[in-house]
Image (spheres, grey):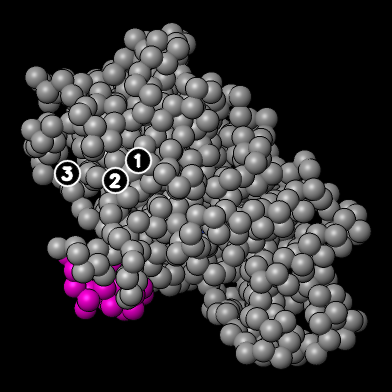
């Protein structure tokens, strides 16, 4: 770490302590005013603060983070002392799925059946300290299954201890304990991660889920920004922000599409798209200031005036990398944004069909196209229209759902925030005229307007069930240049068709967080992937069938097959990349794919603020220095975290 950066961080820390001592309102939420002091540390050296300057420039620590079976694992006495420091907030949970295994003390078939049925539409999984929504990424070590014959339930890739964070003090103690004891540390908020970044074998987990709060600030200025803002807590989910907007009446905060994603956590730190992205930018573009606990255990603010390197890195550089963000101040937009939107369905094939939900927008009855070639021509027409959606500040879906037996359903959704109501029909009519020209007549397309906080996403937390999911997932950003060259877009459409014909679900999230939409400070400097500034579609391809039950060789084969398909899109878009928060666990060239030219600067900042390599998750900045060594060689979190020698 450079002496200059280190000194700046210390000065900031002392100033905030001084303001606190003077009674000034230097900090945000009440949970942030309780901080770890030298007095709290006392004789318990396991929670003493770190000094980045004392870390040798060449790593000299143990090869691996300590595991429960190692002799260097902290003693029961030390864990008990940590728990006492945390006022009893240290949990030692077992995986929920244990209820399905007869040899486990938690065995209870009623509970198991409940987990597999009614619980999937409740908040139960979000209220669990371990649950990660991606089961294969954890290592599939305790699957919830009615028939568990031949399977076991172990702690596997789940953490051993969890700090149910109630204050900054709790989290500082956890950070110091993990660093001093050479433990793997993970941060979990909602557990919404496609590659299970918020879990890890033998880890101590900091669970930010119950740090809840949102507060609107009518007049906030920093740097070049002057206007309304909102403080949001680390544990805030999109639906909670929507409820707060409804209650406040006349204000809008940019949020994710899915209502249970953690907007104060991984979503904004890694980018964060949503229905307002083409108009207002990404979640990361909203951020004006953040509070964070860094790897030395200190509590800092990063914004345009202080800790500017961290401020750059935390807006798009990813969660789980630079520290634990405890809250952030984001832009708030005057007025309640209204979204005009519609959905249409095109189908082909003779198999049975399930029509996905229209997310609250009016939809015409599905239009069946007998000729498959015409169906795919219609798909190409819709892809061609995507740029207009982005240019109008809109957000859309173009999802092809294969249903077996050469049967497909295309769901097209167009949403336009704050678009002049008298012009909205004129906006989408040309799309339906072009479809008519190829013989696809969508009868009476019509739109409706919804207040943003209710538009297609709902204000309830159960609009997206929180049960564990299991998807192999690959993605690519489609750049604007494709729309200047019809034959290249034809080629993209052809690849997507082949992928759907192979049974993959092919989704297009249509949005474009241009520098103009981002505004200050995102348009001047941020770690957001430069490829996102120039995109029109985020193309995501899923394997629909579960992979967590597959033997390792089959998992590898399935992954290779899917990867080969997305590589076809990579070939057609060599200068693009993909979105860090929604990408393949084995993304090749991931540093440039996620961050382009920003990577060297991000790595330098990472090494400066965390020379211990304390914060680690797969495919994050600096992650190349460590790897999870799994017994089966799969890219899961079920193994010790060890140095790679890179
Ligand atoms: C079903 C589903 C729907 C999704 N929908 C969208 C969408 O609409 N738009 C979109 O952009 N993305 C979406 N995503 C991707 C999502 O943005 C990312 O997975 C994001 O990282 C989730 O953050 P989280 O805090 O909710 O989840 P978690 O899994 O708890 O955390 C994700 C990562 O962020 C880290 N992290 C969390 N909190 C903090 C913190 N306070 N400080 C530092 N690091 C932290 C974790 O350690 C982990 O590495 C979706 C994902 C899923 C599974």
Q: Give the camera-side residue of 280 and 84.
A: 84
Label 1 sits on residue = 186
Q: Give the camera-side residue of 418 and 302.
A: 302
Secondary structure state at the residue bearing disc 2: loop
Classify mark 1 as within 8 Å of ligand 1 or not, answering yes or no: yes
> Where is the N terminus found, in terms of image quarters?
top left
Q: Position of residue 243 (x, y in %)?
A: 38, 65
Mark 1–mark 2 distance (CA, rounded to whole Å): 8 Å
Q: Position of residue 257 (x, y in %)?
A: 52, 62
Magenta region, residue range: 106-124
Position of residue 5 in the picture relative to residue 514 (left or right):
left
- Chain-order first, disc 1 or disc 2: 2
Label 3 sits on residue = 90
Q: Are marks 3 and 2 in contact (CB under 8 Å)?
A: no
Say if residue 402 shows up in the picture. Answer: yes
Label 2 sits on residue = 159
Q: Nearer the viewer, mark 1 or mark 2?
A: 2
Mark 3–mark 2 distance (CA, rounded to whole Å): 12 Å
Q: Residue at x 64, y 80 (%)?
A: 403
Q: Give the camera-side residue of 560 and 379.
A: 560
Q: Nearer the viewer, mark 3 or mark 2?
A: 2
Position of residue 557 in the picture relative to residue 322 (left or right):
right
Q: Residue at x 81, y 50 (%)?
A: 572
Q: Are marks 1 and 2 in contact (CB under 8 Å)?
A: yes
- Residue 115 magenta-drawn? yes
Secondary structure state at the residue bearing disc 1: strand
């Amino acid at each position: 770490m450079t002496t200059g950066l280190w000194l700046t961080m210390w000065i900031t820390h002392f100033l905030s302590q001084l303001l606190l001592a003077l009674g000034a309102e230097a900090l945000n939420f009440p949970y942030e005013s309780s901080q770890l002091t030298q007095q709290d540390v006392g004789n318990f050296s396991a929670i003493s603060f770190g000094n980045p300057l004392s870390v040798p420039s060449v790593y000299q620590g143990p090869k691996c983070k300590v595991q429960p079976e190692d002799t260097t694992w902290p003693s029961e006495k030390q864990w008990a002392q940590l728990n006492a420091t945390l006022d009893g907030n240290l949990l030692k949970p077992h995986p929920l799925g244990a209820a399905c295994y007869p040899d486990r003390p938690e065995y209870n078939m009623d509970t198991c059946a409940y987990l597999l049925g009614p619980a999937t539409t409740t908040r139960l999984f979000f209220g669990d300290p371990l649950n990660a929504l991606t089961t294969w990424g954890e290592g599939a070590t305790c699957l919830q299954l009615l028939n568990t014959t031949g399977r076991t339930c172990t702690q596997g890739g789940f953490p051993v201890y969890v700090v149910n964070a109630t204050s900054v003090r709790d989290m500082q103690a956890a950070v110091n304990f993990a660093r001093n004891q050479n433990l793997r540390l993970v941060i979990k908020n909602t557990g919404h991660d496609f590659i299970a970044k918020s879990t890890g074998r033998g880890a101590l987990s900091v669970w930010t889920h119950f740090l809840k709060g949102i507060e609107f600030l009518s007049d906030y200025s920093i740097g070049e920004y002057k206007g309304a803002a909102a403080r949001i807590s680390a544990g805030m989910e999109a639906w909670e922000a929507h409820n707060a907007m409804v209650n406040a009446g006349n204000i809008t905060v940019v949020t994710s599409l899915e209502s249970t994603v953690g907007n104060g956590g991984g979503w904004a730190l890694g980018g964060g798209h949503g229905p307002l992205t083409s108009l207002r930018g990404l979640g990361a573009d909203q951020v004006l200031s953040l509070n964070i606990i860094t790897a030395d255990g200190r509590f800092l603010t990063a914004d345009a005036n202080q800790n500017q390197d961290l401020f750059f890195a935390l807006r798009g550089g990813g969660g789980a990398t630079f520290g634990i963000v405890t809250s952030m101040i984001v832009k708030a937009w005057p007025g309640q944004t209204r979204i005009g939107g519609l959905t249409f369905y095109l189908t082909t094939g003779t198999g049975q069909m399930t029509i996905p939900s229209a997310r609250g927008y009016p939809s015409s009855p599905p239009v069946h196209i007998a000729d498959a070639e015409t169906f795919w021509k219609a798909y190409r027409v819709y892809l061609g229209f995507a740029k207009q959606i982005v240019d109008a500040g809109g957000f859309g879906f173009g999802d092809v759902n294969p249903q077996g037996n050469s049967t497909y359903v295309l769901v097209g959704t167009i949403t336009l925030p704050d678009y002049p109501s008298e012009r909205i029909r004129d906006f989408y009519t040309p799309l339906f005229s072009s479809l008519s020209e190829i013989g696809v007549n969508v009868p009476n397309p019509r739109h409706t307007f919804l207040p943003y906080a209710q538009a297609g996403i709902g204000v309830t937390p159960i609009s997206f069930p929180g049960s564990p999911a299991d998807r192999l997932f690959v993605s690519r950003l489609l750049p604007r240049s494709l729309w200047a060259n019809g034959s290249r877009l034809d080629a993209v459409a052809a690849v997507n068709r082949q992928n759907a014909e192979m049974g993959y679900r092919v989704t297009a999230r249509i949005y474009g967080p241009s520098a103009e939409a981002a505004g200050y400070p995102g348009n001047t400097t941020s770690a957001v992937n430069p490829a996102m500034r120039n995109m029109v579609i985020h193309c995501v391809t899923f394997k629909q069938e579960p992979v967590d039950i597959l033997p390792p060789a089959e998992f590898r084969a399935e992954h290779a097959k899917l990867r080969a398909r997305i590589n076809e899109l990579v070939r057609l878009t060599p200068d693009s990349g993909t979105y860090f928060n929604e990408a393949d666990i084995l993304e090749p060239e991931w540093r440039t794919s996620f961050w382009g030219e920003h990577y060297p600067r991000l790595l330098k900042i990472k090494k400066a603020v965390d020379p211990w390599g304390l914060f680690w998750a797969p495919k994050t900045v600096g992650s190349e220095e460590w790897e999870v060594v799994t017994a089966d060689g799969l890219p899961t979190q079920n193994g010790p975290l060890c140095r790679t020698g890179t």
